[in-house]
Image (cartoon, rainbow, N blue to C red):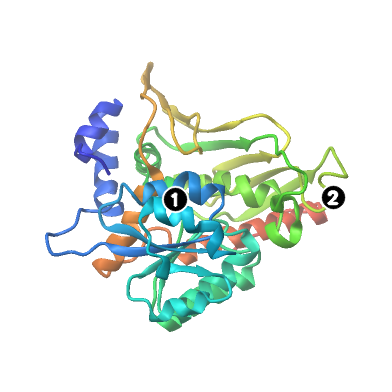
Amino acid sequence: MDHRSRRDFLKKLGLGAAAMSAADSLLAQALAQGPQPDTKPLGYAVVGIGNLAKGQVLPALMKTKLSRLTGLISGSIDEVRHIARHYGVAEKNIYTYQDYDRLASNPDIDVVYIALPNSMHAEYTIRAAQAGKHVLCEKPMATSVKDAEAMIAACREARRRLMVAYRLHYEPYNLAAMKMCREKQLGQIKMIDAEFSFVIGDPQQWRLKHAMAGGGSLMDIGIYCLNAARYLTGEEPLSVYAQAWSSDPVKFKEVEENIAFMLKFPSGVLANCYSSYGIEEMNRYRVGATDGWLEMEPAFVYYGLVQRTYQQSKYTVTTPSDWDQFAAEIDAFSEAILNNRDVRTSGEEGLCDMKIMMACYDSARTGKAIPFV
C-alpha cells in the first residue's frame, strides 16, 4: 500500500523469519498485487458519509492502487458537496438514498462501500446488487441471520461479489498471528482471551438503539473478539455460553453494555471473550500454547498494533504498525474482482459471526450453553 515491498515492510516490523515468511505468503494472497499497466482502477461509491467514512474510508481510497473514489451517497446532496469537491468526485456521481437505485446506469461506479448503521446494511446491499454493483459492507454485516442470508442470496443472484469489511484479515501482524497459530509454531493452543471496550458517549446515538444496531457492545466491538478467536484457531465453535449485563438501565435500556462469552472449539481450545461500552480502552487478545504465547495489544484499532510473542525463553516485540487496513482491504476486494478470485472475508464469513452472536444472545437470555453447528 506504500512504496515499500511487502517483505521489506515485514522485516522492518521485526517479525521473526518464520512469521515473516508466513505473513508474506498470506499477504501475497490477500492484498492487492498492484495493477497491470492497462488495468483501470475500480470505481467505488461510499454509502453513508459519517465519521467512519470521513475519517478512514475516504482517505484510504486516496492511497489505493486498484480502487478509486468515484461516488458518494448520503441523505442530502447539499450535505456532501464540499466533500465531493475535496475528493474530486463529480456532482453527477452524488446520490441520495432515495435515488440510490440510479447507480445501475452509472458506469463510473463498480463497487459500493456500505458504511451505514447496521440495520441499513441489508437493504443497501440488496439494492446495490440489483443495480449490478459489487458490495463491500461494514461489519456486522446485518442485524439478523435472515438479513445476512438475504444479502448473500441477492449478490449471488446478481452475480456480484459481496465482501464484509473485516480489515484485520488484511493487516500483517494479524496475518502472522493466524499463520503461527494454525501451524502450531507455538505448540498446541490451549486458550484464547480477547477483550475490547470503550466508554460510549452520546446516549442518543444509533449504537444504543436496538432497531438500528441490532445489539450493544457485542455487535459493535465484541465481534472483533469473536472473529479473532475464529481466525486464530481456523475452527468454528461447538458451543457458546454468554452472560450480558448493564450498569445503567437508562442509558442501556435497549442494548447490552457488557457481555462475556465463551467459545468451545473442536480442538479443545476455550476462548474467553469480553466486550463493554463502560470500560476505558481494553483492546487485546492473548493466545496461550504449550510452547509459548502470542499477544496483540492493541489488537483491534486502526493503527499502532503491537505483537508480542514468548517462546524458548525469548520475548519478541514488534514496532507499532502504521499499515492502512482500510486501503488494504479495499484493494484486496478490487484484486479479487479484477482477477475473478474468491474474497477472503466473504458474506459467508459475516453470516457465521451473525449466527454465533445470535447464539450468544440466546445463551445470555436463557442462561444455558447453546450448541453451534
Q: Considering only order in the chain, which callout, 1 or 2, is on the residue closer to the N terminus?
A: 1
Q: Is residue 246 above or below residue 265?
A: above
Q: CA distance from mark 2 to mark 1?
A: 31 Å
Which residue is the site of mark 1?
57
Residue 96: quarter of image = bottom right
Residue type beneath disc 2: Lys
Q: Quadrant of the C terminus?
A: bottom right
Secondary structure found at label 1: helix
Q: Which residue is mark 2?
A: 253
**Three-letter code, disc 1:** Val
**Residue 36's x, y, as percent?**
14, 59
Q: Residues within 10 Å of mark 1 (few under 14, many from 20)?
A: many
Q: Nearer the viewer, mark 2 or mark 1?
A: 1
Q: Is residue 346 above or below residue 293?
A: below
303, above or below 158, in the image? above
- Extreme-right residue of the structure: 249
Q: Residue 323 in the image: state x and y as whole percent.
A: 35, 38
Residue at 27% over, 44% down? 1
Residue 222 position within the rendered picture, expressed as x and y whole percent measured from the top left: 62, 45
Direction from residue 13 to residue 154 in the image, left or right: right
Q: Label 2 crowding class (10 Å Cα cut-off): few <14, some 14-19, many 20+?
A: few
The percent position of residue 5, horizontal first and vertical second, equals 19, 39
Mark identifier at residue 31: none
Q: Is residue 255 left or right of residue 275?
A: right
**Residue 169 shows in the view:** no
Of the pair 128 and 339, the residue shown nearer to us: 128
Answer whether labels 2 and 1 touch (C-beta < 8 Å): no
